[in-house]
Image: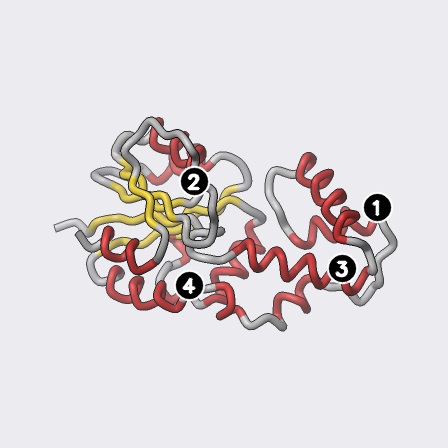
C-alpha cells in the first residue's frame, strides 16, 4: 500500500521565518547604525528587484546603498543563532510519528543555499531527505511539474493566495492553511480550506 504524501511549505509553516528575519534585521541595525526606516526602505527596493529573499544577496545590495562594516557576515550570524527559537518543539513530535506512514516533502521558495541552511540548522533534515526537498526561486506550481504527484496529496502552506494557485492547477492536492506563525487569514473566502492555528491541531487533522 502506497504511503500518503504530505507536502509542507517551509517559511512560516515549519519555521518561524518572521522571527528569524526580525532578528537578522535587528543585527543589521546594530552593526550598521542604520535606522529601522532606512533598512525597511532598502529591503522594499531589494524586494522589487528580487523574487526571493537571500541574506547574501541582500547584504550585497545593502552595501551598494550604504557603507557597511566589513565584519558583517550573514554566515557568521546564522551560525551563531540558537535555531531552536525558530521551531515549535511540538512539530518534531508530530513529524516523528507522521514519517512512519507518510512521505514527507518540503516545497519552498527562496535562495537555495539559504533554504537548505535553514533545514539543516533546525534539524528538519532528519525528517525530510534531500530528494524530498523542492526549492524554487519562482513559481511553486512549475516546481511541482517534474515530480508527477498522484493520488490525494495533502498540501500545508501559510499563504492563502499561493495555495489557491497551486490547488487550482493540481486538483488532487488537499489544502490546509497553517497560521501558527502568521496572522494572514483572509477576511473573505470562497472555499472549504481547513485553517489550523497550532501544530497540535495540525497533527490532529493530518492523522485523521
Q: Residues within 10 Å of mark 2 (few under 14, many from 20)?
A: some
Of label 3 and label 2, which has the lower sequence position? Answer: 3
Query: In this figure, which residue is indicated by the disc labeled 1?
Result: 65
Task: Estimate the x, y position of residue 129 in percent, counting from the top left.
Answer: 37, 59
What whole-number distance in Å separates the C-alpha atoms at marks 3 and 2?
30 Å
Q: Residue at x 79, y 54 (%)?
A: 35
Q: Which mark is residue 29?
A: 3
Q: Position of residue 164 (x, y in %)?
A: 38, 31
> Which residue in the protein does label 4 denote?
124
Q: Earlier in the sequence, mark 4 or mark 3?
A: 3
Residues at marks 4 and 3, CA–CA distance in whole angstroms = 29 Å
Front tag of 4 and 1 = 1
> Would residue 25 appear left or right of 173 to someone viewing this image?
right
Spatial CA distance of label 2 from label 4 is 26 Å
Residue beneath the point at 83% across and 47% down: 64
Q: Which residue is mark 2?
A: 185
Q: Marks 1 and 4: in contact by CB < 8 Å? A: no
Amino acid at each position: 500500500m502506497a504511503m500518503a504524501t504530505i507536502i509542507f511549505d517551509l517559511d512560516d509553516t515549519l519555521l518561524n521565518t518572521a522571527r528569524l528575519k526580525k532578528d537578522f534585521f535587528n543585527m543589521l541595525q546594530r552593526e550598521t547604525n542604520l535606522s529601522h526606516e532606512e533598512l525597511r526602505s532598502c529591503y522594499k527596493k531589494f524586494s522589487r528587484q528580487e523574487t526571493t529573499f537571500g541574506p547574501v544577496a541582500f547584504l550585497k545590495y545593502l552595501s551598494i546603498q550604504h557603507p557597511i562594516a566589513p565584519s558583517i557576515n550573514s554566515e557568521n550570524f546564522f551560525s551563531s543563532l540558537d535555531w531552536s527559537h525558530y521551531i515549535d518543539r511540538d512539530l518534531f513530535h508530530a513529524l516523528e510519528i507522521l514519517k512512519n506512514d507518510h512521505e514527507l516533502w518540503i516545497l519552498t521558495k527562496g535562495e537555495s543555499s539559504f533554504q537548505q541552511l535553514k533545514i539543516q540548522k533546525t534539524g528538519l533534515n532528519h525528517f525530510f531527505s534531500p530528494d524530498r526537498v523542492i526549492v524554487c526561486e519562482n513559481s511553486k506550481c512549475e516546481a511541482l511539474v517534474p515530480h508527477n504527484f498522484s493520488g490525494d496529496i495533502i498540501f500545508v502552506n501559510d499563504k492563502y493566495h499561493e495555495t489557491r494557485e497551486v490547488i487550482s492547477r493540481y486538483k488532487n492536492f488537499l489544502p490546509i492553511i497553517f497560521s501558527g506563525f502568521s496572522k494572514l487569514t483572509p477576511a473573505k473566502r470562497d472555499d472549504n480550506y481547513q485553517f489550523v492555528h497550532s501544530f497540535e491541531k495540525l497533527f490532529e487533522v493530518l492523522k485523521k
